[in-house]
Image (cartoon, rainbow, N blue to C red):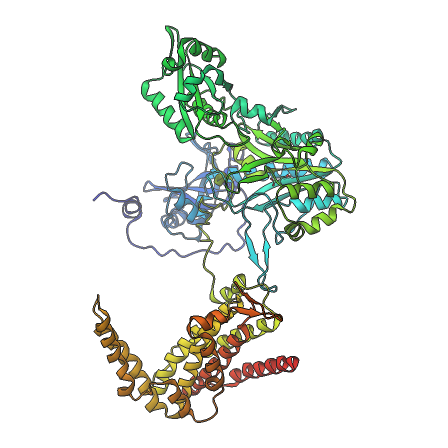
């Protein structure tokens, strides 16, 4: 068999036996140089370096270790003859061991041009092995083939590579520069809350349940939008923040559920003022990465961007503009080709020689993007040909080529869209995608260029197919072009916003707007978006109020820091500039989050599903039930229960089932499903009666109970054939049931309750009451009926407080009873149990007194 990489390393290089290394202490050792700092200029000096064993080469008398730290790699040589001790120690070193080396820097006889430190090496006099390491799952090298999943799972090893270090360092420098520029321009960094309420940026919120306020939630901010506007109302004048935002949306390769923004807002700004701030920031950030960006950045209207480039974030590093050529298709051809909207075309330079197969591929691509069809014209030197020549005629083919500004050698690609989407040029958007595809394929994109662009004149609304209504194209605080205000209600699709986007090389870096600063307009907009008065007050009441107390005109923007760092680092994935990124499935593979939570936390999280309207007294009852279950959990279930006699055996069965039932009753109750919880609590009543009954003659009754349970189960299992028919089933059930008589376990609950021999609150009152209400459809439906004073009925839907106290009290009394018997069986001190019992009495008495 071919040896795996691992076998090869361990077997041949290091030998298979496990060497146990004695580890050294760091003690007073002090690093004098970083590995990457050793250059010819320090030759002759003594040095102490610290880092990881990057590679090891054993040439017998000479052993080489490449040592790596954040700054680079340097070669260390161990000489068996001159430093036998250090050499012997070096023999124990393995990849990724952590070491300190003392030695002298010397000039190499032959420099290694591959290494920045290649002119020198360190001759070791002493090696300290500070820690060992398992063989890493992949080598620490820039060019690694390990699957990204493995890299993310072992991110700490992945991070040891030079590239992530470079990227994170660059990101740090960019952010540092941004902070400096913002400060120079008079902006103050202010932190806004992470635990807050929903901000409407069009994604789902990440929610955090409040432990204190049952059934209520914080939302993690999708952006600090509302807060930064309120900071303007608060007179801060110029705010910025490098801030985490959270959006729960379907992830794509270039999206992260949590991401970082440069968020800013300023008072009394003209659009131009905001552009100048950002241009300054971007030019300086680019300079950090050694990139020269030109300002001012050009502007383009949204509609021109769509019509010319088929995108709201056009890549201006190459031309190949789109042209609207609908009129080259005569009516008849349009009908034949089922063309409805506009047709857009572009001329791909030098692609006239595309093969049939290449054209088919383009058609496929266009169709996958939603095209009705793709039509081609080849403008070859020997003549113009077209796939639609028969349909539109040679005149139109010529006209089309001209309209697309095609030159000899070009391939004209025209597309129509399958579906019309209100307010968009669907065919242009498809052609825009083809433009990018062809731009790459034909190598038209000059990767050395940095083309910034402002897009303005966005529509305020966009049509949502799923909601079948107009929704905010950006967030609903975006300002409205003054002269379009009057169309807000009558022709919303014509209303333009005061929003703008910043684009770099075909990437949207961020967006912003001059805001609505008047409460009357803000309210009109919310209404135009279909928010009812009540929704409005609930979601934005505080903000609308704030707007009424003297809000200055204001505006701002937010730029994606991750994306900026990615582009400036020349990376294609955001994950390359984020230390601990999430996968496209929103997981952190290293920390294994999201994850299930431990039991106590899970109990706290039950309040997530809690009914927010549950009254205090019901919460208090539910908490007492929780307290009871945790007393029982602590006293009984933390160790293995003894089974020395029938009493113990039967009680362990009963109490463990009751435990699960009680938890379920509490959960259902907290979420306001009292009727269902009460139904379940009947089984606790029965178990409580069973416990009392067993307690009368623990050995005898305990034995009978166990026999009845075990035997009837066995009979059921044995008796049932895979496809039992009804009579067969009845037979089996009957057999299983006779065990009650055979085992000596009284069959009917009333027999057991009577035998207990004293007034049984649980049986006499609770069981009957619950049975009456809960038996049968009619009764349980009746539990959902409410009658008002006038005798009218209404049906109660969803959670409420109904039946919650009955369910919880029954649960508590029953479970407490069972626990007393179990504690007795296992001879456990009952003090704690008594304490919760007393609390329950106090609470119920208080409630009763209040009710009286
Ligand atoms: N809040 C917006 C966003 O996060 C940016 C802005 O309007 O300032 O996209």
| Residue depicted at 41% across the width and 27% down the height | 372
The percent coordinates of residue 851 (x first, y second) are: 64, 80
Q: Answer with left or right where residue 394 lies relative to residue 449.
A: left
Q: Could you say which is closer to the camera, residue 249 or residue 682?
A: 682
Q: Residue at x 40, y 36 (%)?
A: 143
Q: Nearer the viewer, residue 133 or 420?
A: 420
Marks counted in the figure total 0
Residue at the right extreme?
550
Please provide percent x and percent y for residue 359.
Answer: 36, 21
- The residue sitting at the top extreme is 382
- In the image, what residue occupies the spot 51% across and 25% down? 310
Determine whether 731 is above or below 50 in the image: below
Among the 4 quarters of the image, the one containing residue 281:
top right
The image quadrant that residue 396 belongs to is top left
Q: Is residue 826 visible?
A: no
Q: Is residue 451 left or right of residue 107?
A: right
* Rendered location of residue 826, percent (x, y): 41, 85
Where in the image, quadrant-wise, is ligand 1 located?
A: top right
Tell me: residue 807, above or below residue 83.
below
Is residue 304 visible in the rendered image? The answer is yes
Asked if residue 547 is positioned above or below residue 652 in the image, the reply reads above
Could you say where residue 483 lies in the image, as x and y percent from the top left? 71, 29
Where, quadrant-wise, is the C terminus in this rendering? bottom right
Where the N terminus falls, by quadrant?
top left
């Amino acid at each position: 068999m071919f040896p795996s990489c691992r076998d090869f390393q361990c077997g041949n290089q290091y030998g298979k036996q496990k060497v146990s290394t004695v580890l050294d202490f760091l003690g007073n050792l002090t690093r004098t140089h970083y590995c990457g700092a050793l250059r010819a200029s320090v030759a002759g000096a003594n040095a102490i370096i610290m880092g990881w064993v990057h590679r090891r080469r054993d040439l017998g008398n000479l052993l080489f270790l490449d040592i790596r730290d954040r700054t680079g790699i340097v070669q260390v040589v161990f000489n068996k003859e001159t430093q036998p001790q250090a050499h012997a120690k070096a023999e124990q070193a393995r990849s990724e061991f952590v070491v300190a080396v003392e030695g002298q820097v010397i000039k190499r006889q032959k420099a290694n041009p591959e290494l920045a430190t290649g002119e020198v090496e360190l001759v070791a006099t002493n090696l300290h092995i500070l820690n060992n390491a398992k063989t890493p799952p992949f080598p620490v090298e820039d060019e690694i083939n390990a699957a990204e999943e493995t890299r993310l799972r072992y991110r700490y090893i992945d991070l040891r590579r030079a590239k992530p270090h470079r990227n994170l360092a660059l990101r740090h420098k960019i952010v540092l520069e941004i902070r400096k520029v913002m400060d120079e321009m008079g902006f103050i960094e202010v932190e806004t809350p992470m635990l807050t309420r929903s901000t409407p940026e069009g994604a789902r919120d990440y929610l955090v349940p409040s432990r204190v306020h049952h059934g209520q939630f914080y939302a993690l901010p999708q952006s600090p939008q509302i807060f930064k506007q309120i900071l303007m109302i608060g007179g801060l004048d110029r705010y910025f923040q490098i801030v985490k935002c959270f959006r729960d949306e379907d992830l794509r390769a270039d999206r992260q559920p949590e991401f970082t923004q440069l968020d800013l807002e300023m008072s009394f700004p003209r659009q131009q003022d905001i552009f100048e701030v950002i241009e300054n920031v971007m030019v300086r950030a680019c300079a950090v990465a050694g990139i020269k960006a030109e300002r001012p950045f050009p502007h383009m209207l949204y509609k021109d961007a769509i019509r010319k480039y088929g995108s709201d974030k056009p890549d201006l590093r190459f031309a190949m503009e789109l042209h609207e050529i609908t009129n080259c298709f005569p009516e008849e051809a349009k009908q034949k080709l089922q063309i409805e909207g506009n047709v857009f075309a572009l001329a791909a330079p030098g692609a006239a020689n595309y093969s049939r197969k290449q054209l088919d591929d383009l058609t496929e691509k266009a169709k996958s993007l939603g095209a009705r069809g793709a039509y081609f014209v080849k403008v070859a030197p020997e003549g113009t040909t077209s796939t639609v020549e028969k349909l539109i005629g040679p005149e139109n083919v010529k006209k089309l080529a001209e309209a697309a500004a095609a030159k000899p050698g070009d391939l004209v690609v025209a597309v129509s869209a399958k579906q019309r989407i209100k307010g968009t040029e669907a065919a242009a958007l498809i052609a825009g995608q083809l433009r990018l595809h062809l731009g790459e394929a034909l190598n038209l994109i000059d990767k050395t260029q940095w083309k910034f662009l402002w897009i303005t004149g966005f529509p305020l609304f966009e049509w949502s197919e799923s909601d079948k209504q107009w929704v905010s194209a950006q967030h609903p605080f975006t300002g409205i072009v003054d002269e379009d205000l009057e169309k807000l209600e009558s022709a919303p699709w014509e209303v333009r916003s005061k929003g703008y986007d910043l684009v770099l090389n075909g990437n949207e870096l961020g967006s912003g707007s001059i805001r609505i600063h008047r409460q009357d307009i803000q309210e009109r907009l919310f209404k135009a978006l279909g928010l009812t008065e009540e929704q409005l007050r609930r979601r934005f009441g505080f903000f609308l109020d704030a707007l009424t107390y003297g809000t200055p005109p204001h505006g701002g923007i937010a730029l994606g820091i991750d994306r900026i760092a990615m582009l400036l680092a020349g990376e294609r994935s955001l994950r390359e500039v984020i230390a601990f990124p999430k996968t496209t499935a929103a997981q952190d593979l290293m920390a294994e989050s999201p994850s299930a939570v431990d039991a106590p936390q899970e109990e706290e999280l039950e309040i997530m599903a809690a009914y927010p309207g549950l009254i205090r007294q019901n919460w208090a009852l539910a908490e007492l039930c929780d307290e009871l279950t945790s007393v029982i959990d602590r006293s009984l279930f933390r160790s293995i229960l003894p089974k020395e006699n029938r009493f113990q055996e039967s009680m362990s069965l009963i109490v463990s089932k009751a435990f699960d039932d009680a938890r379920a009753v509490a959960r259902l109750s907290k979420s306001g499903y009292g009727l269902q919880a009460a139904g379940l609590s009947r089984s606790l009543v029965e178990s409580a009666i069973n416990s009392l009954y067993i307690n009368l003659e623990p050995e005898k009754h305990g034995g009978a109970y166990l026999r009845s349970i075990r035997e009837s189960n066995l009979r059921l299992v044995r008796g049932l054939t895979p496809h039992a028919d009804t009579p067969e089933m009845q037979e089996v059930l009957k057999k299983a049931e006779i065990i009650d008589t055979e085992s000596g376990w009284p069959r009917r609950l009333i027999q057991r309750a009577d035998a207990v021999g004293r007034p049984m609150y649980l049986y006499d009152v609770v069981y009957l009451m619950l049975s009456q209400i809960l038996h049968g459809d009619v009764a349980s439906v009746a539990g959902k009926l409410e009658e008002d004073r006038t005798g009218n009925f209404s049906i109660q839907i969803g959670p409420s407080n109904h039946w919650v106290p009955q369910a919880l009290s029954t649960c508590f009394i029953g479970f407490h009873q069972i626990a007393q018997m179990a504690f007795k069986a296992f001879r456990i001190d009952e003090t704690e149990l008594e304490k919760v019992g007393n609390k329950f009495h106090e609470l119920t008495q208080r409630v009763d007194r209040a009710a009286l």
